Every structure is written in C-alpha cells, then in structure tokens.
Amino acid sequence: MVKNESDKIKEAVSGEEESEIEEIKKTKKKEGKEPELTDLPGIGPAVSAKLEGAGITDLMGLAVIGPNELSDISGISPAVARKAIQAARSLLDLGFVDGAEFAKRRENTLNITTGSKNFDELLGGKGIESRAITEAYGAFGSGKTQLGLTLAVNVQMPTEKGGANGKCVFIDTEGTFRPARIKQVAEKMGANPEKVLKNILVARAFNSDHQILLVDKVSELIKNGEPIKLVIIDSLTAHFRAEFSGRGQLADRQQRLNKYLHSLMKLAEQHNLAIYVTNQVMSNPAQMFGDPTTAIGGNIVGHASTYRIYLRRGKQGSRVAKLIDSPNLPDNECVFFVTEGGVVDNA
Ligand code: GTP
Ligand code: MG
C-alpha cells in the first residue's frame, strides 16, 4: 500500500521520541510556559529564525503546513520536517486525522440555526457548526449579543427545527445576559420559556483569568453528563483588552488570547460542540476608505476563528452580516433583523 503524506507524518516520530515529546509537554506545563519552535526536534535557533522570517512564529503555525513547504522555507530535509510537524501536533494535542476519518467526523457535525435563513445560507446553509469557532465582531448595538441569545435558545431545538438537542453555556463577561430576552425568543420558537432558561448555564467571568478557567469548568460539566452543544463567550476580548492596555503589553495579551483560543478549539473538537464568541472593534486610522473598523485581537483571533462575521447596522433597522475570509465559503453578505423574537429574516 502506498502511504499518504498524513500517515508518513504520523509515523515520523518513533515511540521513544514520542515519550520525549511527552516529557517536554510536562516540563513546559510545570513551568507555565508554552512550548516554542526550538523545543521541536531538528529546529535550532537558526531554523527558528528562518521560520519567523516566513511568518511562522509558533507551534500552531508549523503544525498546519506541509513537510515540503517547511523544508523549502527552512532548508531542513523533508524527513526532518515531518518529524518536527508531528512533534508540534503532539505538543498541541491536535490529533490530526486523515481524509477518511475527517469525512466520517464531518458526518456528525451539528448545526445550529441563527433564526434567519439568509444568515444560515451565509454560513453554508444550516447556521453555525460544531467543532468550529464562529466569531461575530462589530460596533455596539450591531446585534452580537442578540445573535448569541438566539443561538442559546435554538441549540435546544431538535435537529428538524435547526437545533442540536443540547444545552448551552453562556460565559458573560459584561453582564449582558438577559433572561427576559431568552424567554421572548423561546416563546417565538414555541418552546417552554422556563425550560429553555434552565438549559442555559450562565457564568459571569470577572476577569481574563476567570474566563480562561471556565473552559475547564465546561469540560467538567460535560464529563458529568451535561449535553452541552454550544458555548457562548460574550465578549471574548473585553477583559483582555482592559487588562493589557498598557504600552508594551500587546504581545502578552496576544499570547494569552492565542492560548485561550487554542483551548477553546480543543474543547470544540473534543466534544463536538459549537463555539460562538463576540468581539469588539476599534477604529483603524490606517484604513482611509470603506469601513474603518478592525476586530480586537487582530490576526490572532482571525486565524483561530473558523467563521468570522462582521455585523453592522443596515437600512431601515436591518442588520448586515458579512462573512470574512472563510476557508471554504465565498465572502458574502446578507441582511437580517433583530426583533423581540431574536434574529429573523424579516422584521
Ligand atoms: P455591544 O455589546 O454593546 O458591543 O453591542 P451588541 O452588538 O452586543 O448589541 P446587541 O446584540 O445587544 O444589540 C442591541 C440592539 O438589538 C438594540 O439596539 C436593538 O436595536 C436590538 N434589540 C435588542 N432587543 C430587542 C427587542 O426586544 N426588540 C427589537 N425589535 N430589537 C431589539
Ligand atoms: Mg453585546
């Protein structure tokens, strides 16, 4: 049988080397540090500098490229490149899978309707999906929280009604969770408002440390049998932005955000659940034309989000959602409305 590249990468690291990688993982964890490129076999300071020059600054960047590309950039042989890639994947617990396994996994991907057909279409037909992070960014009042509240209700619906038959965890960093709004949306869906409210586990995150800690709490809840299929974080970035606002703190903030996003992605992968996060915008003085707004957290958040949506107010009380840089869908826009019953196609 001819081996495919993904098998070759998997087999590049021997059993003995694997335990060495486990050792590195443990040591780094104890030290409270993230593994770096130079921790990987075959990657010394000179190679690492070349990689950084090519924009590969962390393990995630390396884990997702191919051995030939890595070899071209750094000058190491493809065999060494495979070893380094596999080591990076193990260190990140990425558990890459081959095509057949991937296809099988896709089959049980869950979707949650946004409440608007147009919006669902924008996201590929059925709304937001499991094993993915969907990020909505936009100005205040653009509908980010309202979309979250709608999803928190819709996830509980049966699949025929666009739900995932699951519960929701709502991580609230800004005190914007509104039980009364949940009840209204539930009523519109023809569901029992009290029951729907009970199936939303709300946690107020008081600072970024607390917010990060809550990821483990979600895992615990799931282990205890809670069928959680949606995790909402409203807002993803507000605490990080407030706490790391000083000059020279940007790199720290980005690093922490990056780590947090990786743990969210892992949560989504491990438990086949959907993650919806909101993000604020800041004005970008460098952009002279068009809409001068950029999402907080920039590329770090952009790379980690599977689907990135920009929300803004449209004509006559409508909202516009624009899909940005999706890996498998065209950049497109749609119009929707926020009503008492949540997100809908027409007011
Ligand atoms: P920030 O959190 O401030 O950044 O904004 P956001 O994007 O989260 O805004 P949010 O989703 O809270 O949207 C608020 C807007 O939704 C309001 O200005 C209203 O236009 C609309 N909205 C909220 N509740 C209702 C409602 O019950 N009925 C109607 N018709 N509109 C509502
Ligand atoms: Mg909000």
Image (tube, rainbow, N blue to C red):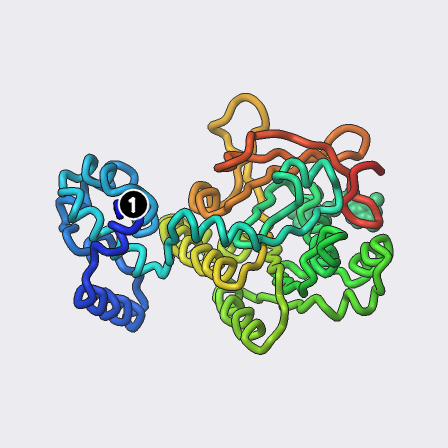
140 or 227: nearer the viewer:
227
| Badge 1 element | loop
Whether ligand 1 has any atom under 8 Å from the Cβ at mark 1 is answered as no
Residue 217 higher or lower than 185, as above or below: below
Q: Nearer the viewer, residue 83 or 142?
A: 83
Query: Which residue carries the number 1 mark?
Result: 4
- Residue at 62%, 59% (x, y): give it: 230
Residue at image position (54%, 59%) is 272
Residue 64 in picture, x, y percent from top left: 34, 46
Residue 3 rendering spot, x and y as whole percentages: 26, 47
Amino acid tagged 1: Asn
Against 194, residue 147 (above or below) is above
Q: Residue at x 57, y 72 (%)?
A: 222
Q: Residue furthest front?
A: 1
Relative image position of residue 243 (x, y in whole percent): 48, 58
Task: Rate crowding at label 1 as few (under 14), some (14 to 19) or many (20 or more) other CA atoms within 10 Å.
Answer: few
